[in-house]
Image: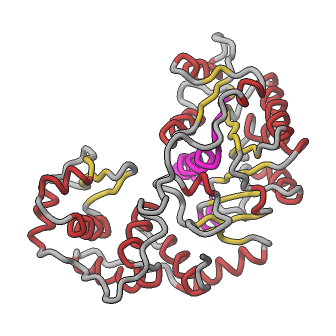
């Protein structure tokens, strides 16, 4: 079911509000039934805990939506087609994605291909040939539009089909700048460019791990070509494993430091990959893990209840009781519920209040950690 335009704008505002990450976004929608209701409740929830919220202005959200439309793009909203089905399975899936290009390129049968920015000539050639072979098999090829292996993967895929580029900044600021032409070609030739960041966002170092989780989440498997021991590609590999995706690595010379990380992945159990047959032999029809947003597991959010939920179903003493159980080491929310003897709905409401106040951090896997001194 597609949201009404007012709700779509409210979702964009909620996603763009400082302090509202993907996990908090989902919890707010589950609690209040809609983004519009969550926006109405946020100032009260935050002020009660001494942390007033600066909601993202409606005018700015409208300007961003209009600017994206002028670029020929659109927003994709979690839980609504054509939001990528595989990515939606992730617990911290972006609530909103900006898209330039063809939504049909967001195939559920996709493989990510990532690797070193300073890749060797042989590594780039292998990445390009492997991407072309994957595209010939009808698979979408996902990468990050970076120099080196990423660019080779996009170019190879374009020879035989379509490709998906995930960028760390806004879709209106191609990065690196010399890949503006490649980004334009991806869009013109039926591919897609995706970004979680707002328009006008220049990519910073902290944005790239977030971009990497999208790369991993879009694909059934991730192939690593030439990754050093401290490579960002290894972050993508770890995120792929956490998301239940298959992991592949191309072996390289032990004398080349650009290959030590990818060789280490093979030692740890990644599928040794020399050609497209090695990928196809181990590529599943669907990820190993069941969808996190399947009915009954938190998505879609429940229909709004007849009467509004109370802002806090328990006295403030209950919040302190929950806080006393938390420390900097993440703990399962289920364990908190078991130890504090409060109802599950009360604990969830308290944790949301504490999260909005900046006193706890909700983490993937339904875990929570305390922020600041105990």
- Left or right, 100 with respect to 367, comes to right
Colour logic: secondary structure
Magenta span: 197-224
The answer to if 219 sits in the magenta stretch is: yes
Q: Residue at x 70, y 22 (%)?
A: 273
In the depicted structure, whether residue 293 falls above or below residue 227: below
Front in this rendered view, residue 67 or 299: 299
| 194 shown above or below 246 | below
Instruction: Please name the residue shown 32% across and 57% down the image.
Output: 361
- The answer to which of 193 and 204 lies nearer the viewer is 193
**Image quadrant assignment for residue 118:** top right
- Give coordinates of residue 238: x percent, y percent: 51, 35
User: Relative to residue 212, is residue 99 depicted above or below?
Assistant: below
Query: Which percent across, then down, holds residue 222?
Result: 64, 36
How many numbered marks appear? 0
Q: Position of residue 133 (x, y in %)?
A: 84, 33
Q: Quadrant of the N terminus?
A: bottom right
Residue 204 at x, y = what percent? 57, 52
Residue that appears at 39% across and 71% down: 30
As for residue 314 lying within the magenta part, the answer is: no
Would you say 253 lies left or right of 330 here?
right
| Quadrant in which residue 50 is drawn | bottom left
- Is 104 displayed left or right of 301 in the figure? right
């Amino acid at each position: 079911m597609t949201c009404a335009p007012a709700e779509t704008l409210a979702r964009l505002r909620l996603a763009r509000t400082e302090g509202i990450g993907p996990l908090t976004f989902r919890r707010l929608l589950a609690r209040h039934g809609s983004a519009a209701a969550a926006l109405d409740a946020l100032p009260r929830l935050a002020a009660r805990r001494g942390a007033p919220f600066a909601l993202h202005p409606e005018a700015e959200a409208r300007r961003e939506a209009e600017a994206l439309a002028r670029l020929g793009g659109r927003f994709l909203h979690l839980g609504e087609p054509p939001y990528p089905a595989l990515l939606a399975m992730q617990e911290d899936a972006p609530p909103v994605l900006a898209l330039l290009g063809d939504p049909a390129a967001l195939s559920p049968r996709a493989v990510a291909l990532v690797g070193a920015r300073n890749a060797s000539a042989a590594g780039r050639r292998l990445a390009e040939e492997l991407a072309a072979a994957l595209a010939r098999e009808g698979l979408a090829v996902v990468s990050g539009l970076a120099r080196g292996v990423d660019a080779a993967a996009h170019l190879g895929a374009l020879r035989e089909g379509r490709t998906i580029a995930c960028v760390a900044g806004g879709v209106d600021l191609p990065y690196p700048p010399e890949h503006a032409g490649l980004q334009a070609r991806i869009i013109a030739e039926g591919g897609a460019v995706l970004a979680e960041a707002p328009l006008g966002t220049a990519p910073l170092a902290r944005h790239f791990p977030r971009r990497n989780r999208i790369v991993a989440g879009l694909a059934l498997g991730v192939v690593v070509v030439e990754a050093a021991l401290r490579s960002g590609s290894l972050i993508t590999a770890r995120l792929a494993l956490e998301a239940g995706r298959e992991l592949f690595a191309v072996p390289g010379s032990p004398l080349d430091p650009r290959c030590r990380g990818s060789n280490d992945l093979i030692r740890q159990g990644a599928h040794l990959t020399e050609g497209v047959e090695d990928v196809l032999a181990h590529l599943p029809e669907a990820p190993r893990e069941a969808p996190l947003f399947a009915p009954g597991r938190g998505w879609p959010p429940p229909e709004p209840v007849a009467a509004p939920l109370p802002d806090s179903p328990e006295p403030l003493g209950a919040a302190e009781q929950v806080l006393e159980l938390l420390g900097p080491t993440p703990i399962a929310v289920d364990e908190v519920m078991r130890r504090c003897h409060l109802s599950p709905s009360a604990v969830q409401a308290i944790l949301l209040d504490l999260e909005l106040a900046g006193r706890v951090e909700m983490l993937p896997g339904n875990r929570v950690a305390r922020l600041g001194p105990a």
